[in-house]
Image (tube, helix red, strand yellow):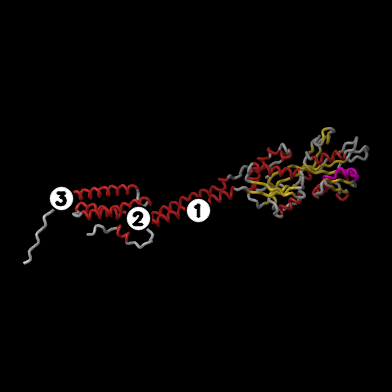
């Protein structure tokens, strides 16, 4: 019996360059680790994609107006706070041009008047402010010629401040509901910078200004048109309730006494008029999460810009009623109603799904690695059995050369066993059992060598005589 034959000899007969079980297992382990790292990288990239800063284009006008300045201040506040939503203002010629920009997909948000004809793609996000229609007649020394009501405007010339057609349309609505035919009135429209020239060069019987109650332009126009010694008469829109009922964009409003001047008091009493909103609107296609984040940030920075722009205090939440003049965007409604989803609310399913997928991949990888290591485990078991066989053979061996050969084979088996343990093919308990068997084998070899060395030489047997 050749004691040096066994697993070690089989390994020696493997063709050069053929992959050993240990190398194959290492490669598979590297592949599994690479797959897991790739999945982690994909999840990290997806997280960055969904949380990266988003820049929205917002159309606002006209140039150098308070609206433009407020939007620029909001954009700067967003950038200063490194907010998720950033703004890039696009300055237009006015609210109508801003609405057109939104309809043409040239902007994501826009500042528009609530009484404009807008595409169905525009949805409300917030009120920037409320606008009020202010009608007044310049003071006259002759009380007989003084215009005191809207019904007396028929046959007169009215100056309309602002070049937008929307102001003329508003005047027509007021006149018609007040019993005055629009064609019986002549309107003269001019820019906000041309008030002084119009007062000097044109004879106008009444004026219309549209804007917030704290509008500097309206206050200056009233002052410019007031003649010395004669205070203007503010014209009340008595049909405001009827207009609000018939036209969804308009509401009935009041101008408190002293709104435009405290000394002298202008107006000297509360005046009923028409009001309507100036809105932040967004494209319907803009995601709910993006609009909700913008709305939250908008109301978050409102206080920080109040000192520079007091009109920012007028920014209010939109009307979420189903019959609102402008349908509210679902993202803004979610913020107003307290139903805005957090990052975990929106992506928890994906996160938990990814964790479960990682866990499943880990389990599959562990099973696959174990499956590939079954040959190593089987081979190691055979080697352990071979070691036990050599232990029995060592105790009976009569040759020191055979003992040395078995010792060399045991060293090879020990090296392969340690490799299996490093690869995870065998457990620590199996390694301990192998260590005990190896120790017993070494003791048996050492004892047998001592016995053979100390044993006296046996007399040689006489050869049989051949007859």
The local secondary structure at tag 2 comes to helix
Residue 265 against residue 242 in the figure, above or below: above
Q: Circle 1 is placed at which residue position?
A: 38
Quadrant (top left/top right/bottom left/bottom right) for the C terminus: bottom left
Mark 1 to mark 2: distance in Å? Answer: 29 Å
Mark 3 to mark 2: distance in Å? Answer: 42 Å
- Check residue 252 for magenta coloring: no
Q: Bin the neighbour count of mark 1 within 10 Å (Cα to Cα): few under 14, some 14-19, many 20 and up.
A: few
Tell me: 37 left or right of 114: left
Q: Nearer the viewer, residue 150 or 122?
A: 122
Q: Earlier in the sequence, mark 3 or mark 2?
A: 2
Q: Circle 3 is placed at which residue position?
A: 455
On residue 434, the disc is none
Q: State the extent of the magenta-drawn residues as a range.
A: 192-206
Q: Circle 2 is placed at which residue position?
A: 376
Tell me whether the residue at label 1 lies in contact with that at label 2, contact meaning CB atoms closer than 8 angstroms: no
């Amino acid at each position: 019996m050749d004691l040096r034959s066994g697993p070690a000899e089989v390994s020696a007969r493997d063709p050069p360059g053929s992959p050993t079980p240990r190398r194959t297992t290492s490669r598979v382990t590297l592949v599994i680790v690479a797959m897991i790292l790739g999945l982690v990288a994909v999840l990290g990239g997806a997280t960055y994609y969904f949380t990266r800063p988003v820049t929205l284009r917002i159309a606002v006008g006209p140039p150098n107006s308070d609206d433009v300045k407020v939007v620029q201040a909001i954009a700067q506040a967003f950038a200063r706070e490194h907010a998720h939503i950033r703004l890039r203002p696009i300055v237009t010629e006015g609210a109508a041009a801003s609405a057109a920009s939104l309809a043409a997909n040239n902007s994501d948000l826009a500042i528009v008047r609530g009484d404009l004809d807008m595409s169905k793609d525009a949805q409300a996000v917030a009120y920037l402010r409320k606008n009020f229609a202010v009608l007044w007649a310049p003071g006259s020394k002759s009380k007989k010629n003084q215009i005191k009501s809207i019904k007396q405007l028929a046959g007169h010339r009215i100056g309309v401040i602002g070049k937008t057609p929307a102001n003329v349309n508003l005047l027509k609505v007021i006149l018609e509901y007040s019993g005055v035919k629009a064609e019986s009135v002549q309107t003269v429209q001019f820019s906000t910078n041309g008030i002084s020239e119009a007062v000097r060069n044109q004879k106008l019987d009444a004026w219309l200004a549209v804007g917030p109650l704290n509008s500097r332009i309206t206050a200056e126009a009233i002052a410019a048109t007031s003649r010395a010694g004669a205070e203007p008469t503010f014209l009340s829109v008595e049909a405001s309730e009827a207009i609000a009922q018939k036209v969804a964009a308009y509401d009935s409003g009041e101008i408190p006494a002293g709104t435009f001047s405290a000394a002298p008091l202008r107006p000297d009493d509360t005046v009923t008029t028409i009001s309507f909103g100036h809105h932040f609107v967004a494209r319907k296609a803009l995601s709910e999460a993006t609009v909700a984040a913008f709305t939250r940030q908008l109301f978050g920075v409102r206080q920080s810009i109040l000192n520079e722009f007091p009109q920012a205090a007028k920014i209010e939440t939109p009307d979420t009623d189903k019959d609102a003049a402008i349908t509210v965007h679902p993202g803004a409604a979610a913020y107003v109603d307290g139903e805005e989803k957090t990052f975990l609310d929106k992506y928890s399913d994906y996160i938990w799904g990814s964790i479960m997928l990682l866990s499943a991949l880990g389990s599959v990888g562990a099973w696959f690695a174990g499956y590939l290591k079954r040959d190593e485990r089987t081979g190691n078991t055979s080697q352990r059995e071979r070691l036990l066989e050599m232990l029995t053979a060592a105790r009976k061996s009569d040759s020191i050369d055979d003992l040395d050969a078995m010792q060399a084979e045991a060293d090879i088996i020990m090296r392969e066993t340690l490799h299996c343990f490093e690869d995870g093919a065998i457990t620590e308990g199996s390694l301990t059992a192998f260590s005990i068997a190896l120790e017993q084998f070494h003791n048996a070899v050492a004892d047998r060598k001592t016995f053979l060395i100390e044993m006296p030489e046996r007399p040689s047997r006489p050869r049989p005589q051949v007859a």
